Amino acid sequence: MSYQVIARKYRPAKFSDITAQGHVTRTIQNSLRMGRVGHGYIFSGLRGVGKTTAARIFAKALNCQKLMDDPEYLQQVTEPCGECESCRDFDSGISLNISEFDAASNNSVDDIRTLRENVRYGPQKGKYRVYIIDEVHMLSIAAFNAFLKTLEEPPPHAIFIFATTELHKIPATISSRCQRFNFKRIPLEDIQKQLQSVCDAEHITVEGDALQLIGRKAQGSMRDAQSILDQVIAFSAENDHEGAISYQGVADLLNYIDDDTMFDVTDAVVAQNPAKMLDVAQFVIKNGYDEQDFLEKLVEHLRNFLVVQNLSSTRLVERPDAVRERYQRDAGNFSPFAVMQMVDFIMQTQKELKFQFEYQFRFELALLKLIDIVHSVSAEAAGVTPPQKKKRLTSH
């Protein structure tokens, strides 16, 4: 049998398996218990957070024979049984009651007209015909308009579930006819826990910090995290410790600039050490790191200082304990105003770098400028006129 990637192998099969979307699964399960199932749903949110998975489980539950025949099971469990004929057909991919429609490649009026014709026919087995339309925001305006009447007055056996990453692109005339569910970005702790359970099931040894790094790279998307884990497992296969996944191995594979390099930047600013700052710039350039990506991570680094300064706590800093302690210790080296000035300058530099020819020089100059920014802010706070201003004042 061919290899199945982790994202598919460990795809949730029940509502309870879906991570961090309890507000959605609870509402759907309650609607099943009460028999208050709507005809149109919109699932929106970041990629890889469970929208299509939830739609499939919902569609499976709607035609589950056990849920229809056993009131006690419906009230107490409210999960597709996985054993009845309808559930087995769904798992085998041969169910005629559930149709998945990719709006990214079928977005014309003719495609919607064909779908509209099919909606008229009832299910061969079970109670409902469920239409899952993925990337629904890709439909043309004409296609949306052609769908309006069907969505407003659908036949009693038809249920539509729309999945989208861009809710704002769906016309109000469509969204107002549906129940809307916003899927949350998955917290880092939940991603890390899920990846750990996958590694345990696959008998893979892994460092906790390595999983945290994968989770941070995924930015709230479980599918992205699982895809990265697949890649990391292959990369670590020849590891001396029987394929164990280490933090350093993950950092090398992802070409990730670690926290020590970010602290080197802020240490150089505090020490007013331009030589050390140029060493950091050379390290980034020589190792082939993307300068824009580096600046983006530097903004996140400075954001962590602001969080510590404003909360007097590191609870919102998603880093290992040792790194969080360092943020707590170093936060007093800057005023919040100085940190915000640096962030503003870096974000402006990110925009300007896209249009500059002397890319390396501009990047080095931007890092050196951070020293000047903080020094100027500190001098003004102390009531000392910076040398540049003195020069301008005496020239009048």
Image (spheres, rainbow, N blue to C red):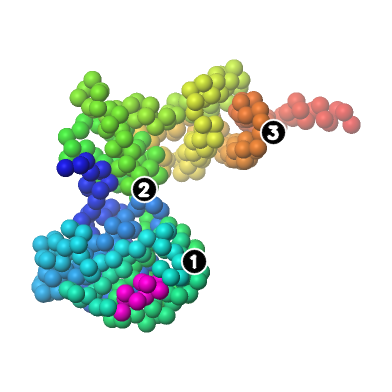
Residue at 30 percent across and 29 percent down: it is: 235
Q: Is residue 117 magenta?
A: yes
- Disc 3, SS: helix
Q: Residues within 10 Å of mark 2 (few under 14, many from 20)?
A: many
Counting from the top left corner in percent of width and height, residue 321 is at 35, 33
Residue drawn where x is 38% and y is 42% of the image: 218
Q: Nearer the viewer, residue 270 or 370?
A: 370
User: Between tags 3 and 2, which lies in front?
Assistant: 2
Say which residue label 3 marks. 380
Q: Residue at x 41, y 71 (%)?
A: 112
Whole-angstrom CA distance, mark 1 to mark 2, is 27 Å
Instruction: Tell whether label 2 touches label 3 (CB within 8 Å).
Output: no
Give the magenta-colored segment's residue range.
Answer: 112-120
- Residue type at mark 2? Ser
Q: Amino acid at mark 1?
A: Ser
Which numbered disc covers residue 368? none
Three-letter code for the amino acid on which mark 3 is drawn: Glu
Q: Which residue is the site of mark 1?
A: 140
